[in-house]
Image: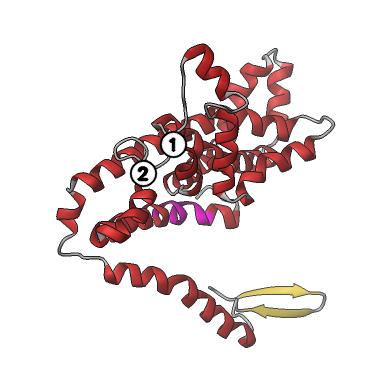
Amino acid sequence: MPASTVRNGTRRIRSTGRPPSVLLLPAVLGLAFLTLPLLALIVRVPWRALPAQLLSADVGTALRLSLVSASLATLICLLLGVPLAWVLARTTFPGRRLLRAVVTVPLVLPPVVGGVALLLLLGRRGLVGQYLDAWFGISLPFSTAAVVLAEAFVAMPFLVIAVEGALRSADPRYEEAAATLGASRFHSFRRVTLPLVAPGVTAGGVLCFARALGEFGATITFAGSFPGVTRTMPLAVYLALETNRDAALVLSLLLLMVSVLVLASLRERWITGRAG
């Protein structure tokens, strides 16, 4: 980091960006704690058997199901989460803080608990699921649709937080100008607001996809683990550890690569607030 000079009163303080010595050792230990397990995974991956494992039926099926379900879950999050973020950021009403807390609960809720909650709501004897089954013959648990719903449930808060933050930092004068020119609120939202917060929507969507792709607890509780139907990559990793260790390592590597690509593309934006 280049050195910079800052004037403080009559004195000049030269900042080099170097951390205090007392922080270096904990920082190095923290870095080692976070990176060494990932390094161990990379080292133990059966690289020679990697092509064969990637082409195997089990890995291919789990990968395909994970990509499809995560994409559908992200689409649901975009359709529902963007309007929800707009309500939280642009309107004032009693209980808004409570609503924001409820929206962010899945971030800290154990995923298994989220799966149980979905099962109690949408199961065949659930609060809503019993009517879906009785009136329409629809049973959601232990189906691919259940995978998508479970992933959307745990991933949507990431989108809402990202979009709400983008809306709060966007200049509302552009929307006010559109309103004075006769634009309706929906037209202003579609043609003015969305382009302004597009980077935030993109960041939130990518985070949703990554979170949905790695979801395990809610999925196995609400959807189970049936090959080709609900067994996504995280579930396949867990099961393959006992039967096919090479396949488990290959699937873990794929999930790691996706996570690294997502975080590498978005981390700078989180820290600096810049779009680049």
Q: Given the current orientation, which residue lies at the most extreme bottom position?
A: 21
Q: x and y percent of residue 131 in the render?
A: 57, 18
Relative to residue 46, is residue 119 drawn left or right?
right
Question: Circle 2 — which element?
Answer: loop
**Residue nearest the viewer, comparing 149 with 183:** 149
- What residue does disc 2 label? 232
**Residue nearest the viewer, comparing 121 with 179:** 121
Q: Main secondary structure of the magenta part?
A: helix
What amino acid type should be assigned to the residue bearing mark 2? Thr
Q: x and y percent of residue 54 in the render?
A: 20, 51
- Please tell me in which quadrant of the rendered image residue 50 appears: bottom left
Please, which colouring scheme is shown? secondary structure
Is 27 placed above or below 165 here? below
Residue drawn at the location 82% of the way across and 34% of the way down:
95
Is 267 placed above or below 126 here? below
Residue drawn at the location 24% of the way across and 61% of the way down:
246
- What residue does disc 1 label? 147
Q: Which residues are magenta?
A: 261-268
Relative to residue 108, is residue 60 drawn left or right?
left
Relative to residue 64, is residue 53 drawn left or right?
left
Q: Given the current orientation, which residue lies at the most extreme right position?
A: 94
Let me know if residue 3 is in the magenta part. Answer: no
- Please tell me in which quadrant of the rendered image residue 35 appears: bottom left
State whether residue 200 appears in this view: no
State whether residue 181 appears in this view: yes
Question: Given contact means CB atoms under 8 Å apart, are the residues at marks 2 and 1 in contact?
Answer: yes
- Please tell me in which quadrant of the rendered image residue 115 appears: top right
Question: Circle 1 — which element?
Answer: helix
What amino acid type should be assigned to the residue bearing mark 1? Val
